[in-house]
Image (tube, helix red, strand yellow):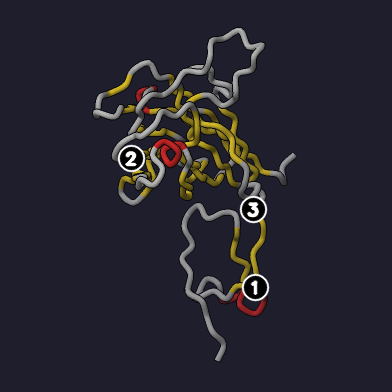
């Protein structure tokens, strides 16, 4: 007996699209079960641009990350500066983010253009407190079963054992779902960072970015 695979096709499924076998093509409207012969690549192409690629102060910023298919965009949530300051740089030495133990923020985006896929752990807190368990609470918000374009991010460690100058808090993975342009920005334009004693730290800057999704079959 031929095995059949039951699948659920979400409204905005992209990246790997179902292609039924020819002998089932006339039954597609009648059968909830589809036998796949393979996948076709999505015609969408997504690209990310940071609002500030070289922040020079105590900053939380979104920066490009490698990986994914052409319709996917990965970006790092960066703490601190993105580049090492050279001897010839006229700016002062990089500032330390002292005793940071928690970062929390809400990220806004257009859910009609991009969709959250998941995240990968970073290295900032792992280096700040070697051997400690890093807590990652990263959740997409929904209303009536549909994404509302809000991602809540809360990353923390019990205690910081050493100061960190810079590093990645996490890498966020999104996929383009429709042609368009999505601004990514911190809700209320700020987030929250906390020190070793649970105090709210001030003087931080926040930089988002934008994602453009285009159809490569259109000229």
Q: Which residue is outermost to the top?
A: 90
Compared with 136, 183 (above or below) is above
Q: Quadrant of the C terminus?
A: top right
Q: Give percent across and percent down for residue 73.
A: 58, 42
Tell me: 199 left or right of 33.
Answer: left
Q: Nearer the viewer, mark 3 or mark 2?
A: 2
Name the N-terminal-most of marks 3 and 2.
3
Compared with 168, 72 (above or below) is below
Compared with 97, 218 (above or below) is below
Q: Give percent across and percent down for residue 100.
A: 36, 29
Name the N-terminal-most of marks 3 and 1.
1
Q: Secondary structure at mark 1?
A: strand
Q: Nearer the viewer, residue 80 or 52?
A: 80
Q: Mark 1 highlights which residue?
A: 37
Q: Secondary structure at mark 2?
A: loop
Q: Mark 2 packing: few (<14 Cα in 10 Å), some, or many (20+)?
A: some
Q: Secondary structure at mark 3?
A: loop
Q: Mark 2 highlights which residue?
A: 157
Q: Which mark is residue 42?
A: 3
Q: Nearer the viewer, mark 1 or mark 2?
A: 2
In space, the residues marked 3 and 2 are separated at their CA atoms by 39 Å
């Amino acid at each position: 007996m031929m095995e059949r695979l039951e699948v659920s096709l979400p409204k905005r499924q992209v990246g790997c699209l179902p292609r039924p076998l020819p002998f089932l093509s006339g039954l597609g409207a009648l059968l909830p079960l589809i036998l796949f012969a393979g996948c076709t690549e999505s015609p969408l192409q997504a690209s990310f641009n940071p609002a500030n690629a070289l922040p020079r102060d105590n900053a939380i910023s979104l920066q490009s990350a490698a990986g994914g298919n052409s319709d996917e965009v990965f970006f790092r949530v960066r703490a601190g500066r993105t580049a090492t300051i050279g001897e010839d740089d006229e700016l002062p030495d990089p500032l330390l983010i002292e005793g940071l133990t928690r970062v929390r923020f809400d990220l806004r985006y257009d859910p009609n253009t991009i969709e959250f896929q998941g995240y990968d752990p970073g290295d900032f807190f792992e280096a700040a407190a070697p051997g400690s368990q890093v807590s990652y609470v990263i959740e997409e918000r929904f209303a009536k079963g549909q994404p509302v374009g809000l991602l809540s991010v809360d990353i923390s460690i019990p205690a910081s054992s050493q100061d960190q100058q810079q590093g990645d808090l996490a890498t966020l993975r999104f996929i383009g779902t429709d042609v368009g342009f999505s601004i990514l920005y911190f809700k209320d334009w700020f987030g929250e960072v906390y020190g070793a004693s649970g105090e709210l730290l001030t003087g931080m800057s926040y930089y988002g970015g934008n994602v453009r999704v285009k159809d490569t079959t259109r000229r």
